[in-house]
C-alpha cells in the first residue's frame, strides 16, 4: 500500500508539473498570436498605434521572453528531466482510452466472423499503436505521425459505433497535442516565444524603448532585459541570410551589423541619454542650491533613490552587445564636463563639485579632465639650481629609487623637506628649451673636475699613501695565504688608525667624514646628469603624440625622375636615399655618453695628480662604509624628532653612486670584489647575533629563577614577584644591542644594494 501511495504521488506530481509547462506553452502561443495580430493589422490598414496600447504590447513581449527564460534557461534541466516521465504518462493515458476499443475488437474477433476483415485492420492498427506507445520514451516526428495515423485508422465508425464516446475522442486529441508539444518542447518554445517578426516593425522601436524608460521610473527593472532580448531575436533570421557575404572575422552579415547599430543607437538615445540628462540636471541643482541659501535646498532623497536603481542595475545585453548603464553615464558626464570646462575655465570649480556630489550620491567615478583652472608653482627653477650647483649637491641627498633629490640641511624648526624630481626638471626644460641639457652637462663636468681634484689631493698625502701601501701589502699577503675575506676587525683598526693619522695633520677639517662628503657630492653630480637626461626623455615622449607621421611619398619617384641638363642627357637623382638617411640619423641619434665624458675628466685629473695613490682606493672602502653607516643611522634618528634637526635625512644614495663611479673609471671593481667585504659584514653580524642570543637566553634563565624564588618566598605579597619580573639592566642592554645590530645590518645591506644598482645604471648610461 505504501509503494502504491508513493507511485500515485509521483504520478500526480508529474501530471501537475506537465500541466504547468503545457499551460505556459499555451500562454506563450496566445500572447504571440495577440501580438502578431495587433502589429500586422495596424500595419496592413496603415493605422497608427494608440499610445495606450504600447504598454500592453510590451507586457505581451515580456510574457513571451519570461516564459522562454524560465523554461529554456533557468529551468531547462528540470524540464528535460521531466520530459521522459511526462511522455510515458501521456502514452499511458492514450492507451487507457483505447482499452475499450481493444476489448471490443477482441470480443468481436472471437464471437463472429462478420466484418472480420475490418476487425483485423482495426486490431492491427491497435497493435501498432500499442507497440509504439510502449516502446522507447523518445518520440521522433516519424513516430508521432505513426501514432496519429494508427489512431485515425483504428477509429472505424462502422465498427466502433457506440464503443468510444465523443468526449474520449476529444481527450485523445488533447493527449496527442500534448505529446507533440512535450516530444519537441525546446523547438516548441523556440517557435512560440520567437519575436523575430519585430524586425518588420522597426519603426515602433523608439516608442517601445521610450515607454520602457517611462515605466521603469516607477517600477522594477526586471522587464527591461526581457524587452531587449525580444529586440535581439531578429538576429535569428538576419544571421541566416545567404545572398549576402559574411565577415570572415566575426561571421556576421552586413544586415545584422546595421540592425545591431540601429538598436544600439535607439537604446542610447531613448533610454540612456534621458537618464544621463536627469542626473546632470540633478547635479546642477545640487551645486546651485549649495552655493545659494542652504535653508531653501529641496529634499531630493526620493529622486536620488529612483535614479540610483538605474545605476545599480545589472548590465543589459542586446544584439550581442553588453550595455553597462553606469559606465555609459560616467562617459557622458566626463565628456560633458570636459567640453564645458574648456569653453569656460571659470566653471571648473563647479564641475569639480559636481564630480564630488556624483560620487557621493550616485557612486559614480568620474575622471578628472585635468583642465587647468589656475597656475601652479613648479618650485625652484632649474636654471637657478645650475647657477649654484655646488651648494645644491652639498645640501641635497639623492634617492635612486624615486630618482629625486631631498633636502638635507634645513633650517632649525622646519617640519617639511623640499624635493626636486624629474617632473620639475622637465617643466623647466619645456620652459627654457632642451639646450639646458648641454649646459647642465658642462656645469656638472666642471663641478666634477673640482671634486675629483679634491679626492686626488687627499690620496696624494704622504701619510695616506703610506697607510694605503701598508694595507695593500697586508691584503696581498692574506690572499697568498688563502684568506680572501677582508675581516671586519681589520676595517675597524684601519679606521681608527686613519683617524689618528688625520688628527695629527695640520688641517683638522680633513678626515674620513670629509672624504665621504666629497664622494657623496661626486655621486650627486652624476645623479643630477642622469636625472636631466631622464627629464629630457620625458619631454620628448610627451611631445611625440603631437608629431605628424613622416611621409616621404612625395619624393618616392625622385630616383626615377630625370633632370635635363644643357646637353639634354638624363641624370638620375638620389634624393630619396639622402632624405631617408637624414631622417634615420635624426631618429636614431643616441644620447651623449655622459659616463664617457666624465671618465675623460677623471683621466685628465689623474694626469695632473700623478702622485696620488688611486690604486689603493678600494682599501678605503671598508672604512668609508663604516663611516657612512654611522652617519646614516644618526641622520635617521634625527628625522624622528618633532622638529627636523639640521643633520637629519633618510636617504643618501649619492655616496653609493660616487663609489660605483670611482671604482668603474679607476678599473678597481674586480679588486674591490676580491675583498668580499659584504660577506665579511654578514658573517660578522651573524656571529654577533648568535653570541647575543646566547647571552640573552642566559639572562632569561636567571630572570625565571628569580621569579620562581620570589613566588616561593612571598606568599602574601606580590611586590617581590613584580620586581623579579622586571628586566635586569644587563637584559635591557642586550635588547638594545640586538636593535643596534639589526639596524647596522639593514644599513649595510641598503648600501651594497645601492652600489650594485648604481653600477648597473653606470653601464646603461
Image (cartoon, rainbow, N blue to C red):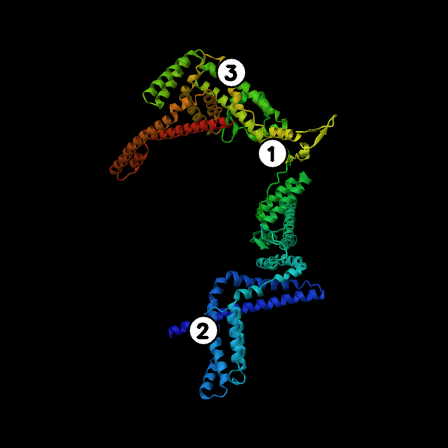
| Residue 409 visible | no
Residue drawn at 39 percent across, 14 percent down: 469
Ranked by sequence position, the earlier of labels 2 and 3 is 2
Rendered location of residue 531, percent (x, y): 54, 27
The N terminus, quarter of image: bottom left
Q: Nearer the viewer, mark 1 or mark 2?
A: 2
Residue drawn at 56 percent across, 22 percent down: 441
Q: Is residue 122 left or right of residue 483?
A: right
Frontmost residue, 159 versus 340: 159
Rendered location of residue 510, percent (x, y): 45, 15
Location of mark 1 (residue): 542
Q: Which mark is residue 134?
A: 2
Above or below for 303 versus 474: below
Ranked by sequence position, the earlier of labels 3 and 1 is 1
Above or below for 714 versus 128: above
Q: Which mark is residue 604?
A: 3
Q: What distance separates the C-alpha of mark 1 from that of mark 2?
A: 81 Å
Amino acid at each position: 500500500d505504501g509503494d502504491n501511495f508513493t507511485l500515485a504521488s509521483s504520478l500526480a506530481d508529474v501530471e501537475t508539473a506537465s500541466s504547468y509547462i503545457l499551460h505556459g506553452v499555451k500562454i506563450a502561443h496566445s500572447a504571440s498570436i495577440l501580438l502578431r495580430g495587433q502589429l500586422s493589422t495596424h500595419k496592413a490598414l496603415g493605422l497608427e498605434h494608440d499610445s495606450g496600447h504600447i504598454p500592453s504590447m510590451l507586457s505581451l513581449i515580456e510574457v513571451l521572453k519570461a516564459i522562454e527564460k524560465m523554461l529554456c534557461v533557468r529551468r531547462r534541466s528540470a524540464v528535460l528531466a521531466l520530459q521522459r516521465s511526462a511522455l510515458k504518462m501521456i502514452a499511458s493515458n492514450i492507451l487507457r482510452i483505447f482499452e475499450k476499443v481493444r476489448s471490443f475488437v477482441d470480443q468481436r474477433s472471437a464471437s463472429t466472423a462478420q466484418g472480420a476483415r475490418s476487425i483485423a485492420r482495426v486490431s492491427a492498427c491497435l497493435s501498432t499503436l500499442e507497440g509504439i506507445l510502449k516502446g522507447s520514451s523518445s518520440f521522433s516526428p516519424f513516430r508521432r505521425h505513426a501514432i496519429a495515423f494508427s489512431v485515425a485508422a483504428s477509429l472505424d465508425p462502422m465498427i466502433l459505433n457506440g464503443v468510444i464516446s465523443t468526449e474520449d475522442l476529444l481527450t485523445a486529441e488533447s493527449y496527442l497535442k500534448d505529446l507533440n508539444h512535450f516530444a519537441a518542447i525546446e523547438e516548441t518554445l523556440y517557435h512560440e516565444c520567437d519575436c523575430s517578426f519585430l524586425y518588420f516593425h522597426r519603426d515602433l522601436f523608439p516608442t517601445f524603448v521610450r515607454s520602457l524608460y517611462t515605466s521603469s521610473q516607477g517600477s522594477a527593472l526586471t522587464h527591461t532585459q526581457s524587452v531587449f532580448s525580444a529586440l535581439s531575436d531578429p538576429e535569428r533570421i538576419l544571421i541566416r541570410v545567404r545572398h549576402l557575404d559574411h565577415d570572415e572575422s566575426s561571421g556576421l552579415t552586413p544586415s545584422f551589423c546595421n540592425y545591431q547599430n540601429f538598436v544600439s543607437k535607439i537604446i542610447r538615445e531613448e533610454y540612456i541619454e534621458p537618464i544621463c540628462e536627469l542626473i546632470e540636471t540633478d547635479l546642477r541643482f545640487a551645486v546651485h542650491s549649495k552655493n545659494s541659501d542652504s535653508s531653501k535646498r529641496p529634499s531630493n532623497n526620493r529622486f536620488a533613490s529612483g535614479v540610483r536603481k538605474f545605476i545599480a542595475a545589472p548590465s543589459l545585453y542586446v544584439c550581442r552587445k553588453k550595455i553597462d548603464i553606469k559606465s555609459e553615464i560616467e562617459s557622458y558626464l566626463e565628456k560633458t564636463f570636459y567640453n564645458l570646462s574648456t569653453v569656460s575655465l571659470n566653471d571648473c570649480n563647479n564641475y569639480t563639485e559636481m564630480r564630488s556630489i556624483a560620487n557621493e550620491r550616485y557612486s559614480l567615478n568620474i575622471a578628472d579632465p585635468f583642465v587647468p583652472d589656475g597656475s601652479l608653482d613648479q618650485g625652484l627653477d632649474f636654471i637657478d639650481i645650475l647657477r649654484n650647483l655646488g651648494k645644491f649637491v652639498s645640501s641635497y641627498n639623492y634617492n635612486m629609487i624615486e630618482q629625486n633629490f631631498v633636502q638635507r640641511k634645513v633650517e632649525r624648526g622646519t617640519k617639511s623637506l623640499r624635493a626636486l624630481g624629474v617632473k620639475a626638471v622637465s617643466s623647466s626644460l619645456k620652459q627654457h628649451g632642451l639646450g639646458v641639457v648641454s649646459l647642465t652637462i658642462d656645469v656638472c663636468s666642471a663641478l666634477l673636475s673640482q671634486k675629483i681634484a679634491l679626492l686626488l689631493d687627499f690620496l696624494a698625502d704622504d701619510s695616506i699613501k703610506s697607510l694605503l701601501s701598508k694595507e695593500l701589502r697586508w691584503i696581498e699577503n692574506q690572499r697568498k695565504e688563502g684568506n680572501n675575506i677582508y675581516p671586519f676587525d681589520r676595517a675597524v683598526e684601519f679606521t681608527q688608525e686613519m683617524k689618528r693619522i688625520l688628527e695629527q695633520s695640520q688641517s683638522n677639517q680633513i678626515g674620513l667624514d670629509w672624504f665621504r662628503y666629497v664622494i657623496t657630492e661626486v655621486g650627486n653630480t652624476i645623479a643630477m646628469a642622469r636625472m636631466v637626461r631622464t627629464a629630457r626623455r620625458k619631454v620628448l615622449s610627451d611631445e611625440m603624440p603631437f608629431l605628424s607621421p613622416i611621409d616621404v611619398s612625395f619624393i618616392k619617384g625622385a630616383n626615377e625622375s630625370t633632370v635635363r641638363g644643357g646637353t639634354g642627357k638624363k641624370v638620375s637623382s638620389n634624393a630619396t636615399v639622402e632624405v631617408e638617411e637624414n631622417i634615420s640619423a635624426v631618429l636614431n641619434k643616441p644620447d651623449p655618453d655622459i659616463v664617457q665624458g666624465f671618465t675623460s675628466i677623471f683621466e685628465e685629473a689623474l694626469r695632473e695628480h700623478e702622485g696620488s695613490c688611486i690604486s689603493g682606493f678600494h682599501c678605503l672602502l671598508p672604512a668609508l662604509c663604516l663611516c657612512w653607516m654611522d652617519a646614516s643611522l644618526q641622520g635617521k634618528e634625527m628625522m624622528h624628532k618633532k622638529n627636523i634637526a639640521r643633520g637629519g635625512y633618510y636617504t643618501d644614495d649619492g655616496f653609493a653612486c660616487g663609489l660605483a663611479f670611482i671604482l668603474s673609471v679607476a678599473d678597481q671593481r674586480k679588486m674591490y670584489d676580491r675583498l668580499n667585504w659584504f660577506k665579511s659584514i654578514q658573517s660578522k653580524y651573524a656571529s654577533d647575533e648568535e653570541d647575543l642570543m646566547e647571552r640573552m637566553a642566559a639572562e632569561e634563565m636567571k630572570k625565571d629563577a628569580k621569579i620562581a624564588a620570589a613566588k616561593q618566598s612571598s606568599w602574601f605579597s606580590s611586590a617581590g614577584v613584580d620586581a623579579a619580573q622586571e628586566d635586569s639592566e644587563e637584559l635591557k642592554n642586550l635588547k638594545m644591542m640586538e636593535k643596534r645590530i639589526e639596524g647596522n645590518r639593514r644599513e649595510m645591506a641598503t648600501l651594497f644594494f645601492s652600489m650594485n644598482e648604481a653600477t648597473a645604471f653606470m653601464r646603461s648610461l
